[in-house]
Image (cartoon, rainbow, N blue to C red):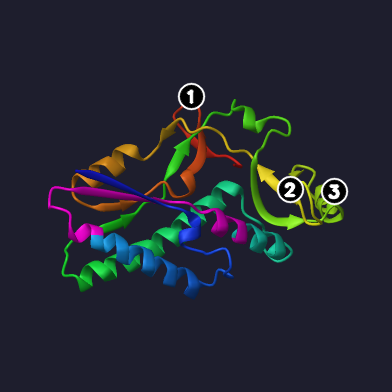
């Protein structure tokens, strides 16, 4: 039997929390304890993969990037996605490994930095079609100031009423393929519990030479 467990980003950071390291580790412990209970009931032939969202983590990291850009350069959206995959993958991997050790289960766990192939012709990349809200909410005045500072940003009104209803949006292109799918399949077939495709994967495009490049999405 093959199992896939999908976790939302809010399973790692609750809406009412600040998002400290301690809070997120604590949430991961709650989550992976339940996963460990499932693993206990699996046969040696059963296989498991885990995927997760990254919305709250990516949003917080974008805020850090914006506030710190006067000191260090802000990173691109694809790199932010990779950073959250590393963060969440590490937390889930470590807490799950600890519960498996407590249960006397010898099941290796591996988190993968995972890319997803998209096309540069996706409609989300054109005009103001970008539909995925990220980062903080702004007043209309703040949104105008940010737009002046970053003309390349797409900022939209995402709520009908209220003062802080404006937010940056980025493209959310349709996935074409999982770049590391063969590597993940081989690990899963070997009995490794794989954590992959965090946040839907790091969006990349592929040229005629087979070279990959990350995109802002």
Mark 3 Cα shell of 10 Å, populated few (<14), some (14-19), many (≥20): few
CA separation in Å, label 2 and label 1: 41 Å
- Nearer the observer, 134 or 182: 134
Figure check: 56 above or below 151: below
Give left or right: position of 48 versus 176. Answer: left
Q: Residue at x 58, y 38 (%)?
A: 172
Residue 54 magenta = yes
Q: Which residue is mark 3?
A: 148
Which element carries disc 2, helix, strand or loop?
A: loop
Mark 2 Cα shell of 10 Å, populated few (<14), some (14-19), many (≥20): few
As drawn, which residue projects farthest toward the left? 44
Residue 108 can be seen in this image: no
Q: Which residue is mark 2?
A: 159
Residue 200 can be seen in this image: yes
Figure check: 125 above or below 162: above
In the image, which residues are magenta? 38-60
- Using the image, tell me which numbered label, if any, was put on residue 146: none
Q: Residue at x 19, y 50 (%)?
A: 191
Looking at the rendering, which quadrant does residue 68 occupy? bottom right
Q: Residue at x 55, y 68 (%)?
A: 19
Which element carries disc 3, helix, strand or loop?
A: helix
Comes first in the chain, label 3 or label 1: 3
Q: Which residue is mark 1?
A: 208
Which element carries disc 1, helix, strand or loop?
A: loop
Residue 120 magenta = no
């Amino acid at each position: 039997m093959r199992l896939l467990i999908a976790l939302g980003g809010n399973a790692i950071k609750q809406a009412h929390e600040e998002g400290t390291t301690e809070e997120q580790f604590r949430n991961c412990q709650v989550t992976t304890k339940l996963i460990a209970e499932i693993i206990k009931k699996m046969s040696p032939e059963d296989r498991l993969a885990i995927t997760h969202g990254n919305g709250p983590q990516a949003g917080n990291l974008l805020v850090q990037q914006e506030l710190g850009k006067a000191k260090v350069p802000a990173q691109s959206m694809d790199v932010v996605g990779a950073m959250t995959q590393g963060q969440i993958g590490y937390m889930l991997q470590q807490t799950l490994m600890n519960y498996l050790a407590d249960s006397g289960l010898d099941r290796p766990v591996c988190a993968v930095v995972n890319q997803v192939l998209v096309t540069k012709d996706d409609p989300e990349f054109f005009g103001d079609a970008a539909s995925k809200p990220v980062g903080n909410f702004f007043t209309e005045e703040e949104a105008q100031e940010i737009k002046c500072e970053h003309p390349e940003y797409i900022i939209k009104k995402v709520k009908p009423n209220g003062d802080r209803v404006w937010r940056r949006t980025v493209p959310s292109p349709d996935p074409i393929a999982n770049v590391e799918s063969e590597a993940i399949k081989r690990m899963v077939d070997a009995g490794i519990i794989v954590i992959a495709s965090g946040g839907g994967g790091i969006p990349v495009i592929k040229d005629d030479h087979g070279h990959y490049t990350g995109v802002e999405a």
